Amino acid sequence: MNRVLLFAGITMLIIAQDLNGQWIQSGLASKKVTTFLVNGANFFAGTSDSLFLSTNTGASWSRASAGVSPQNIHCLAIKGANLLAGADTLPGIGISGIFLSTNSGASWSVTSLPRKSVNALLADGLNVFAGTFGALAFKTYVSTDDGATWNVTGGQPASVSSVTALIRSDTNLIAGSESGSFISTQGASWSLGNANTYVTSFAGIGSNVFMGSIAFFSGSGVYRSTNHGSTWTELNSGLTDTSVYALAASSTNLFAGTASGVFLSSNNGASWTAVNTGLTTPINALTVNGTMLFAGTDGGVWRRPLTQMITSVQGNTLQLPTQISLEQNYPNPFNRTTQIDYELPQRSFVTLKIYDVLGKEIATLVNSSREPGPYTTNWNAQNYPSGVYFYRLTAGSYTMTKKLVLMK
């Protein structure tokens, strides 16, 4: 009986912490968590010594690697049925390069990419791009077979040693480095976008691209590009810590992970508010999974409900949505998983469904009552063939349908 009461007490304490707006520990407390990947019900966390998997939205974790496996993981990506991990060598142990798993990390093989430290991976349409580190060897590699084999793309800026982050914006491939950002189409040649910033991360909201950076030569903080990486504007108002290591977007909200915690902007980076209650540790990685924002730190995984942070900040700076909206899915076209964002001005019963080109309903993503605010939903289409599909949002008397393209 005492054990039951103790368990109930612990459970109520955790619930109370969530309701009071606190960040709470969500596992892997003894690990340095460096990167995340959400793929349907699978939630991966890369650490300095292994890969971990949660199938219950971070409530518990299990080691997802055996035998020859990645260590000191910097980045993760899904392409087709393959899980890819970019890693470098730990002192005295491990192998650099890109590792491939066809069974969600249960076992791994080393790909043909040269044994370089891999800092960035981008699954982009039919291709996967990889960015590496090496003395004066800024290089991107491309794979056309879901990461099994790799070829160098060719071009490289002078006197730049590493690719630290990758993102696609319209027709531009954008690469971050320790000497700024560069743009290309397919990596064959590069032009300078922003000099003298040590780029750590990218995120996209609509047609805006955001770049996180740390002080190295001069600039640091968050930058925004409205022209697909050609030019950038610094946006640090209210960002009291400009050492930005990670970015994550949820609908129209942007989160920045810094050396001293997490900040939120709900106006495209124009101003920032700290959302650090209970969390003041350096942030290595951020991701949105369901209704939670997760932070990877030197002391494991932490989580906090999105609505606590967004409602708090918007209550001071912005009002809740005044009308229902359904955003275009991102990315589009997509491979396997895509994100769908929508906003509600009032409590509504919401359905979000996927249809094929013949109008047949094939998936239900949402079928419940929702409070006012912004929402993000992911569709994992791994079991569906390439082609054109439609997604339809119904909330009260409102209905909107948009097209998406699955390209495997």
Image: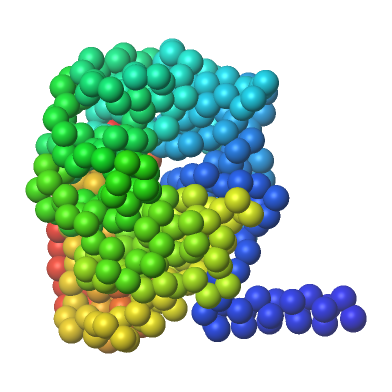
- Which one is in front, 179 or 1? 179
> Which color scheme does this rendered protein use?
rainbow
Residue at screen point 38% across, 48% down: 214
Write down the quadrant of residue 78 in the picture.
top left
Front position in the image: 367 or 250: 250
**For residue 310, above or below residue 80:** below
**Residue, x 43% and y 13% (percent of image)?**
114
Q: Is residue 21 left or right of residue 232?
A: right
Q: Residue at left 41%, top 25%?
A: 133
**Residue 2 falls left or right of residue 347:** right
Residue 51 percent location from the top left of the image? 59, 38
Residue 246 shows up from this direction: no
- Residue at x 32%, y 41% (from the top left corner): 217
Taking depth in this image into account, of 327 and 407 the one nearest to the observer is: 327
Residue 47 shows in this picture: yes
Q: Quadrant of residue 407?
A: top left
Q: Is 52 left or right of 371, judged from the image as shown?
A: right
Residue 359 in the image, given as x and y percentages of width and height: 18, 55
| Relative vertical location of residue 66 with respect to residue 136 in this rendering, above or below | below
Give residue 40's position: percent from left, percent from top.
Answer: 44, 50
Counting labels gives 0
In the image, residue 206 sits, relative to residue 406, either above or below, namely below
> Measured from the top left, where is residue 252 in percent x and y?
25, 66
Task: Single out the residue that lies furthest toward the front.
Answer: 218
In what quadrant of the picture does the C terminus appear?
top left
